[in-house]
Amino acid sequence: MQAGTLQDVSLPIEDLTPREIVEALDVYIVGQNAAKKAVAVALRNRYRRQQLPEADREDVMPKNILMIGPTGVGKTEIARRLAQLARAPFVKVEATKFTEVGYVGRDVDSMIRELVANAVRLVEREMYAEITPEAEKRALDRLVEQLYEGPSPYSDFRFLPVFPDDEPAEEEASPAITEEEYLAAHEKLRVSIQAGEFDNQLIEIEVEEANNPFVQVFSNQGIEEMGIDTNAPGGPFGSRRSVRRVPLREGLPMMIEEESKKMVDRSSIQREAIRRAEQTGIIFLDEIDKVAIKSSGSGPDVSREGVQRDLLPIIEGSTVSTKFGPVRTDHILFIAAGAFHMAKPSDLIPELQGRLPIRVQLDDLVASDFKRILSEPRNALSKQYTALLAVDGVHVSFTDSALSEIADLAAVVNEKTENIGARRLHTIMERLLQELLFEAPDSAQGEITFDREMVREKLEPFVRDLETSRKVL
C-alpha cells in the first residue's frame, strides 16, 4: 500500500473472543458482567459476519441492545470503551434532543452525519500516524534548505560578457565545495535542528487561510446538508496563501502538517470513513426512556412518539445523505439506554422494541462497587488525582480504610439524595481534595497519606447534614 491511500485495508475489528473482550472492558469498568457479555457478543458477531461469503453478509443484521439501569452505573462507559476497543466510529446522542424544537423534532439523520464525521477524523488520525515519519523528513528537508547558507556544488558558476562566436559565453568555475561535503553540511544542520539548537530561529512559512472566514450559511437543516465540506483543504470557500515568520519550534509542526496533507489522498480517506461508519459504527442512544411515554394523542407525548417513529427507519436500515456521500445504516450497531423509572421498555412503539432485541439490566452500585471503582480500573479516580498532584510535587496516597470510607460516604449520600451512581465519587473526591488541589503549587509539598480519620474529618459534616449534602455533595 502506498503512503496516502487506504485501499484494501481490512475492517478494524479486533480478533478477540467474547471472553477476551469482557476482560478488556474489565480494565476500565467494574461489574455489570451481563452488559459486558452482551456488547462482547455483538462485537464478535461483527467479526463473524466479516468472515462469511460476501453474498451472505447482507442478510446478517446487527442485534441492537437496550441497556436498562439508573444513571452512573456504566452504560455510556461500556459503549465508549467498546468503540475504542474496536477502533470504531462512535457517537453518543441523547434521544431527548430530537424533541427540543417541538412537534417536528430535530433531524434524526444528524447522528449519522456526526458518525461519519467522527469516522473521517478516526481514519485521518490513522493515516497521519502512518505517514508522519515521511512528512517529518520532508519538512526537515525544507527547513535545511531554508537555513543552509553555505556554498553549493550545483550552482557554482559565473557568467562572462558576450564574446565572438568562437569564444564561450559561459565559463564554469571549480566548485567551492564537493557534493559529499555539501551533503555532510546538510546532515549536520539537520541534526542541530532536531536537537533544538534552532528553536528560536525565525523561519518563513506559507500558511493557508480560508477566504470569507465570517460567512455563515443558515438553513433549517444546517450546513452539512448543503454539501459543503468544511474539512476540505482551504476550507469550504477556497483559500489564499500568505507568508508568516515564526520561530522554528512553532513552524516545524505546521510544515509537518502541510506535508502530511500533500501526501494524503482525501477521497480514499472519505471512502474508508464511510465504510467504517457503515460496517463498524456504534451509536449510543441515551435517555431512550424519555421518549417512551405512551402517547395521549396530543401535547408533548405526540412529539416523543414522533421521535420514536423518526428513529425507526434509521435503526431498521436506510440511506442517509452526508457531505461525504450516502451512508447506509443497515449494519450500524445501536445501543440504546435509559433508567426507565417513569416508563417501561414495553412503552416503546412495538416496531422499535423489535429493533432492540437484546435487553440487559444493569445493577445498582453499592459501597463495595464504589471501592473497586476508586482503586481497580486503569483510570481509577484515586490514580488520577495522585498523578495530577504529583505534577506539583505532592505525592498523595490512600489507605485501604480511606477508600472504604469514601465508598461508604458515597453510598450514604446517594441514599439520602438523588442516586447518581459512580458520578457521586467525583463530587466527593473533589470536596475531599479541594483545599489540597488549591494549595499544592504554593505550600503543600511532600507525601500525604489519607486514612479513614482524615476522610471522616473532611467529609462527615457534609454527609451528616442532609440539606448540605444536597447542595454540596
Image (cartoon, grey):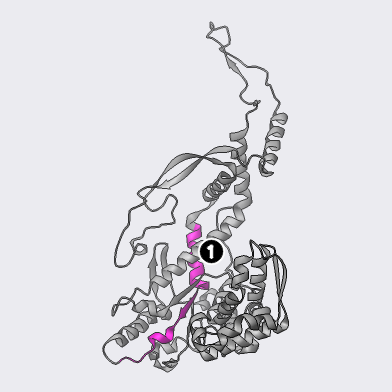
Say left or right for 244 vs 398: left
Q: In the rendered view, does 78 fall on the left or right side of 346?
A: right
Q: Give the residue number, with chain letter if any, for mark 1.
A: 122
Q: Quadrant of the N terminus?
A: bottom right
Q: Residues within 10 Å of mark 1 (few under 14, many from 20)?
A: some
User: Magenta span has 429?
Assistant: no
Where is residue 137 drawn, in percent x and y? 63, 45
Residue that protrudes farthest toward the left in the picture: 298
Q: Secondary structure at mark 1?
A: helix
Question: Residue sitting at 39 percent across and 92 percent down?
Answer: 347
Q: Quadrant of residue 127?
A: bottom right
Q: Quadrant of residue 166?
A: top right
Chain part drawn in magenta:
268-295
**Above/below status of 374 relative to 112:** below
> Disc count in the image?
1
Tell me, yes or no, whether the highlighted magenta stretch contains residue 292: yes
Q: Is residue 108 left or right of residue 164?
A: left
Residue 370 seen anywhere in this rendered image of the structure = no
Main secondary structure type of the part rendered in magenta: helix
Residue 399, how many percent across, how many down? 72, 80
Residue 179 at least partly seen:
yes
**As rendered, which of 378 and 257 lies closer to the eye?**
378
Q: Which residue corresponds to the image point at 62% horizontal and 29% vertical from the top-left? A: 149
Q: Residue at x 44, y 56 (%)?
A: 231
Residue at position x 60%, y 40% in the image? 200
When the figure is inspected, residue 273 is found, relative to residue 465, above or below; the finding is above
Residue 436 location in percent, x, y? 63, 70
Q: Amino acid at mark 1?
A: Leu
Q: Position of residue 101 (x, y in %)?
A: 31, 75
